[in-house]
């Protein structure tokens, strides 16, 4: 055990977590008094009793958010003033980097080095970016005759409900709350019951930064209780959801059956990664393909879980891939050199193992992994798994596994690769590896995906939109395009005499 690992372990032993909701600027227990246990997937340790919010708590949070919106305590501030507060919010996130990173690791199992270097920094950057952007977005004047003046202005939509998943708790929360808050909305956030702790802490830091009480509320709870109530609430103007396609469909139905609130969804993926024989650097393609699927234990909606390799280079690709597999062996998430941590809970562990069993039964061949790991720790770990001989109609090639499982499929022609890549209900992300720029453009245009990476897979930035085609959802997170989700356009036509 390293000195740094000792330090993280000792710090973890001292941490205490407040699992109460944060509504109207105050920490409160659930109206029902009910709680649920939050335990760490790292080793099963107890972390906190978390408020089990339900319809009553959601209603209280929505009322607080509505009051804050109507009295203009936040929406009425100048964009510059909101910017200054959001920049302070981002600064506070960075000032509490170690605390937030360790909370994220203990709560959902990712390696501490990733939580600290990526999740906290990206969360703070998102808050800062939208804060900095909001006073640089101008309204419009439409062309008219001399007898009229037509103004086109953006206004905040009102009360925004946000429901976020457990795989990137802080980051996914920031993707929703940053553009919503910057635009002047009030927000009710429902974090996943599997990883609620950093969202609650973010709300405290927002208050400290100067975001007024009632503007940003967090209600933990289960999806079928708190999440369902939020998406059905008649006084929520917009619901933004990231999670599974199954639940996303329910969110859309609830939005339609209630007050026809706007519903924005970022859902599942089964992303294809196409490696052509003329890829410019095979070693780099292998490293990126392996690193991207096993990053965050494979618990990423955009993970390139379907790897299409041109048949003439498949053996060479797999040989190089197998040589990298030991690097991704699951280890203690509190160790600074750990690359792969724990899955989020027993349910997810069982789900991943069930898919691995299905792959074997349907005829795919396990070349590496395929078993549970580190069971003696009390945590939930799966060895990174590589399947060969996968066909596109197999379960492991069709359904989102959300775990460290990579399926390798061979192709002979680019047309075949494109056809198979598009044979999915999803359309979130894709990758292409070729030195031929014409081929790269042709494939990228043909792929039905919200993002297509060329000769890389893991490069990204807040400046570009993120979202999918087909059943991967609607609308876009990130970039200035996200502002559209949380604003209304108003035309004001003024007659001039």
Image (cartoon, rainbow, N blue to C red):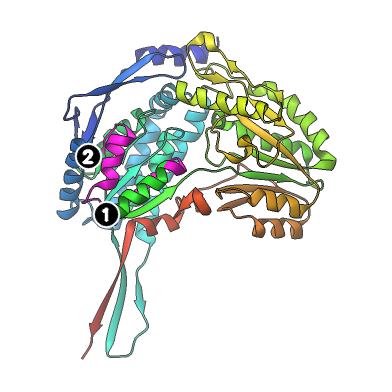
Q: Please give the range of residues in magenta.
A: 218-246
* Left/right of residue 31 with respect to residue 261 in the rendered view: left
Q: Of label 2 and label 1, which has the lower sequence position?
A: 2
The image shows a total of numbered marks equal to 2
Position of 55 relative to 404 (above/below): below
Quarter of the image where one finds residue 361? top right
Answer few, some or many: residues within 10 Å of disc 2's Cα (few below 14, many 20 plus, some between 14 and 19): many
Answer few, some or many: residues within 10 Å of disc 1's Cα (few below 14, many 20 plus, some between 14 and 19): many
Mark 2 secondary-structure assignment: helix
Instruction: Look at the image and say whether residue 443 sits in the magenta stretch.
Output: no
Image quarter hosting the N terminus: top right
Does the rendering let one see residue 368?
yes
Residue lying farthest to the right in this orientation: 312
Instruction: Look at the image and say whether residue 236 sits in the magenta stretch.
Output: yes
Mark 1 secondary-structure assignment: loop
Image quarter hosting the C terminus: bottom left
Does the rendering let one see residue 345?
no
Q: Which mark is residue 122?
A: none
Depth check: 454 or 12 in front?
454
Per the image, the residue denoted by label 1 is: 237
Find residue 491 and report its horizontal and vertical position in percent: 29, 74
Depth check: 464 or 136 in front?
464
Find residue 434 and report its horizontal and vertical position in percent: 76, 50
Q: Residue at x 79, y 29 (%)?
A: 319
* Left/right of residue 8 with respect to residue 432 in the rendered view: left
Position of 407 relative to 162 (above/below): above
Quarter of the image where one finds residue 336? top right
Find residue 420 and report its horizontal and vertical position in percent: 68, 49
Q: Which mark is residue 58?
A: 2
Find residue 401 and report its horizontal and vertical position in percent: 55, 33
Gap between marks 2 and 1 measured at Cα: 14 Å
Quarter of the image where one finds residue 126? top left
């Amino acid at each position: 055990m390293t000195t740094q690992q000792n330090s993280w372990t000792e710090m973890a032993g001292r941490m205490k977590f407040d699992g109460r909701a944060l509504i109207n600027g105050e920490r409160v227990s659930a109206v029902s008094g009910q709680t649920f246990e939050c335990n760490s997937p790292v080793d099963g340790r107890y972390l906190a009793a978390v408020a089990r919010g339900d319809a009553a708590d959601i209603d209280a949070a929505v009322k607080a958010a509505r009051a804050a919106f109507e009295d203009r305590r936040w929406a009425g501030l100048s964009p510059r003033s909101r910017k200054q507060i959001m920049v302070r919010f981002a600064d506070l996130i960075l000032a509490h980097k170690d605390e937030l990173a360790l909370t994220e690791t203990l709560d959902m199992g990712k390696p501490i080095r990733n939580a600290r270097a990526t999740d906290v920094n990206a969360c703070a950057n998102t808050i800062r970016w939208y804060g900095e952007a909001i006073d640089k977005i101008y309204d419009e004047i439409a062309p008219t005759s001399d007898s009229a003046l037509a103004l086109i202005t953006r206004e905040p939509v009102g009360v925004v409900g946000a429901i976020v998943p457990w795989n990137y708790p802080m980051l996914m929360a920031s993707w929703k709350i940053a553009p919503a808050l910057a635009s002047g909305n009030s927000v009710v956030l429902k974090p996943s019951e599997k990883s609620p702790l950093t969202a609650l802490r973010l709300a405290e830091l927002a208050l400290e930064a100067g975001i007024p009480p009632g503007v940003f509320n967090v209600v933990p709870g289960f999806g079928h209780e708190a999440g369902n109530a939020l998406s059905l609430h008649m006084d929520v103007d917009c619901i933004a959801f990231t999670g599974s396609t199954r639940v996303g469909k329910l969110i859309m139905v609830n939005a339609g059956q209630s007050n026809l609130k706007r519903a924005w969804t970022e859902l599942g993926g089964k992303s294809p990664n196409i490696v052509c024989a003329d890829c410019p650097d095979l070693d780099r393609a292998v490293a990126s393909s392996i690193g991207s699927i096993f990053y965050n234990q494979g618990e990423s909606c955009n993970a390139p879980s379907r790897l299409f390799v041109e048949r003439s280079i498949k053996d060479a690709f797999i040989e190089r891939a197998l040589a990298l597999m030991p690097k991704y062996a699951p280890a203690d998430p509190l160790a600074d050199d750990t690359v792969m941590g724990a899955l989020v809970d027993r349910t997810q562990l069982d789900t991943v193992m069930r898919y691995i069993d299905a792959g074997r039964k349907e005829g795919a061949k396990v070349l590496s992994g395929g078993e549970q790991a580190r069971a003696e720790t009390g945590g939930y770990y799966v060895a990174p798994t590589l399947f060969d001989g996968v066909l596109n109609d197999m379960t492991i090639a069709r359904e989102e596994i959300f775990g460290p499982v990579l399926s390798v499929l061979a192709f002979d022609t680019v047309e075949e690769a494109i056809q198979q890549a598009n044979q999915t209900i999803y359309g979130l992300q894709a990758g292409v590896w070729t030195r031929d720029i014409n081929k790269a453009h042709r494939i990228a245009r043909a792929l039905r995906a919200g993002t297509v990476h060329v000769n890389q897979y893991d490069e990204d930035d807040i400046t570009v939109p993120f979202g999918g085609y087909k059943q991967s959802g609607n609308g876009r997170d990130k970039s200035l395009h996200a502002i559209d989700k949380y604003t209304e356009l108003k035309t004001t036509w003024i007659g001039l005499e």
